[in-house]
């Protein structure tokens, strides 16, 4: 006999692309969800893939993981909404597709490759420190970077919220004509 896999309702809703898990919790608390014909307003309610789940009277779509690579340009926030009204990665995605979220972050003025997905397990596995996934950044700076400054990155530096992890730093080239270091 096979065991039916159950999970929390808000987690299943988020995985199906309804909204973020926190937003799904609000939807549940507002009484907008029924499971097998019964209203659910309790967070943490366990459901299975065979349950009939309705949100505002419409059936919950079954989970279908989506994965996209996005080349984030500078001056774009790596978030779905920005309270200050700045452009976000959500605005760069096709509105007709399932709701997806960025895996990790890039700073506002940083450009680079981002994975966008609705696969929460993948995102967790790639970003949570306990999984020890290394990230690679290519940095171009003005001027020649002294070895002692690179050594600080290699041993970790103190920020306002604590020490950074040691970084593997490799200088790729120094262009004396442009006075730029690439590492």
Image (spheres, rainbow, N blue to C red):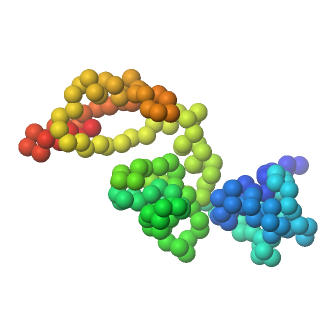
Camera sees residue 6 = no
Q: Residue at x 55, y 58 (%)?
A: 101
Q: Residue at x 71, y 65 (%)?
A: 62
65 or 57, which lies in front? Answer: 57
Depicted 6 relative to depicted 37: above or below: above
Q: Residue at x 31, y 24 (%)?
A: 151
Q: Measured from the top left, where is residue 161 in percent x and y? A: 50, 33
Q: Residue at x 22, y 32 (%)?
A: 145
Q: Measured from the top left, where is residue 40 in percent x and y? A: 87, 62
Q: Is residue 75 left or right of residue 89?
A: left
Locate the C terminus and report the quarter of the image it occupies: top left
Q: Is residue 120 left or right of residue 154?
A: right
Camera sees residue 92 = yes
159 or 173, which lies in front? Answer: 159
Depicted 20 relative to depicted 135: above or below: below
Q: Measured from the top left, where is residue 15 in percent x and y? A: 67, 58
């Amino acid at each position: 006999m096979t065991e039916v896999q159950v999970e929390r309702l808000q987690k299943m809703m988020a995985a199906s692309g309804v909204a973020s898990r926190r937003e799904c919790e609000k939807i549940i608390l507002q009484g907008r969800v029924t499971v097998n014909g019964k209203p659910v307003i309790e967070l943490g309610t366990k459901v299975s893939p065979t349950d009939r789940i309705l949100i505002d009277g419409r059936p919950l779509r079954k989970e279908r993981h989506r994965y996209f690579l996005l080349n984030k340009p500078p001056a774009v926030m790596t978030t779905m909404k920005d309270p200050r009204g700045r452009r976000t990665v959500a605005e760069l995605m096709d509105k007709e597709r399932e709701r997806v979220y960025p895996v990790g972050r890039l700073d506002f003025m940083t450009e680079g490759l981002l994975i966008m997905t609705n696969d929460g397990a993948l995102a967790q596995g790639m970003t949570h420190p306990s999984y020890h996934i290394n990230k690679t950044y290519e940095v171009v700076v003005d001027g020649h970077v002294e070895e002692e400054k690179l050594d600080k990155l290699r041993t970790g530096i103190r920020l306002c919220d604590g020490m950074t992890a040691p970084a593997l730093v490799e200088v790729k080239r120094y262009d004396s004509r442009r006075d730029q270091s690439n590492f």
